[in-house]
Amino acid sequence: MPSNIDLIESFAQFKEFKNIDRPTMMRVLDDVFRTLLRKKYGSDENFDIIVNTEKGDLEIWRRREIVADREVTDSNKEIELSQAVLIEDDYEIGEEVYEEIKLLTFGRRAILAARQTLISRILELEKDDLYRKYSERVGEIISGEVYQVWKREMLVLDDDGSELILPKTEQIPSDYYKKGDPVKAVVKKVEMRNNTPRIILSRTANIFLSKLLELEVPEIFDGLISIKSIAREPGDRAKVAVESFDDRIDPIGACVGMKGSRIHGIVRELRNENIDIINYTTNLPLYIQRALTPAKQMNVDLIADEKRAEVYLTPEDVSKAIGKGGVNIRLASKLTGFNIDVYRQINEEEEYDIELDEFEDEIDRWIIDELKNIGCDTAKNVLEIDRNDLVRRTDLEEETIDEIIRILKTEFED
């Protein structure tokens, strides 16, 4: 027949559970076995449970008061003198007798049920601890290892083996991971789903870039430079507005580093995301002008109550302000919090013309390149050439040439 020790071995594994401190483990074990005692004896008041969390061992002792023979009213709390002296011959009436209760006396079924209860309680504690731990780490960068990759999300294990989720929507478009790859991300949020904590990571959140800068730039970590605003199109481009609290520190130079040493590591981590660092200022027109970099010459009119800005630029700066696919102006709007409308500022002394690159939204890129190949860089360059000559020199279809001419003429009419 199995010994008491053999049965206790099934509990020894619980000392290996992560993140469960000793007092909590002892309290849970005590509670589980007191429930067992109440079921068997009706009360647990006169029982002592001694737990050894180091070995995963425990002992149960029952205290009973010695009474005269045939005067026992509660056999759980009292013992006859004649039985007590069999345990130790110098016992007297009124003293207490301590007896060890072997686990075998509860029966194997009760022990296994207690073990399942204990597993459930410990797992709940682990979940609570994981939820609390990561709730306090929201906004922090963590490093983990890719364990499994699915279509919509990726399972990441941290250093303790805890499971974290990196959804596809929180990954940079050019991210590619396989099992075993290291991954760095920021803890975005922690939620409970079906009573299980779900830790969501992100590589696209603005705070991920903010924390990477904090790690790479000591002046930001020390509070000498403050990040005022961030706008990102993950994996493509980002703008960061910074402010220095020390006049001796150039915030842009500090963030970029010597020959780009500080910013290059961040750019690599973000899959070659181009990062523009600009000086923050409370002068809103100047702030908007800096946000529209690389465009330079402009006039800014604010409509403050509508959070809108009208920006007038020279024709050559319009395309720079808008950026490829409109990315520059979108980021500038996000960074400043203003809706920005761009207008061409025409010098009456100069002939008005428009760069072909500004028509990318209406004319395919390859067609613009074809026109540039014959020396047409602006709208007027194209319109000054005879239609038949354009067809002959570009090898474009007549219908295409007609559509180009219509688009360009409409712009000048407007």
Image (cartoon, rainbow, N blue to C red):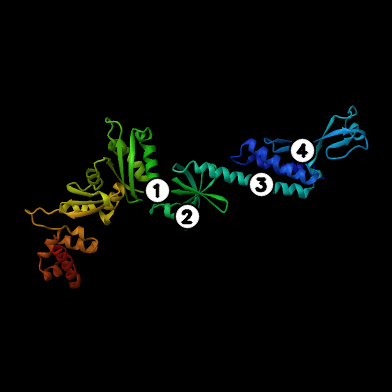
Crowding at mark 3 (Cα within 10 Å: few <14, some 14-19, many 20+): some
* Residue at (30, 48) in percent of width and height: 337
Instruction: Name the amino acid, label 4.
Output: Glu
Crowd around label 2: few <14 · some 14–19 · many ≥20 (10 Å): some
Residue 3 quadrant: top right
Task: Tell me if label 2 and label 4 are in contact, CB under 8 Å.
Answer: no
- Residue behind mark 2: 153
Rendered view: 194 above or below 33: below
Give SS at disc 4.
loop
| Residue 400 rendering spot, x and y as whole percentages | 20, 70
Residue at 57% over, 42% down: 129
Residue at mark 2 to residue at mark 4: CA–CA distance: 52 Å
Q: Quadrant of the C terminus?
A: bottom left
User: Pointer 1: what residue?
Assistant: 205
Pointer 4 residue: 45
Give the residue type that dot 3 points to.
Ile
Residue farthest along the bottom direction in this orientation: 399
Q: Residue at x 26, y 55 (%)?
A: 324
> Left or right of 115: which side holds 86?
right
CA gap, disc 1 to disc 4? 56 Å
Mark before the other along the chain sequence, 2 or 3: 3
Give the residue number, with chain letter if any, for mark 3: 119
Q: Furthest residue to the front?
A: 305
Give the secondary structure at mark 3: helix
Q: Amino acid at mark 2?
A: Glu
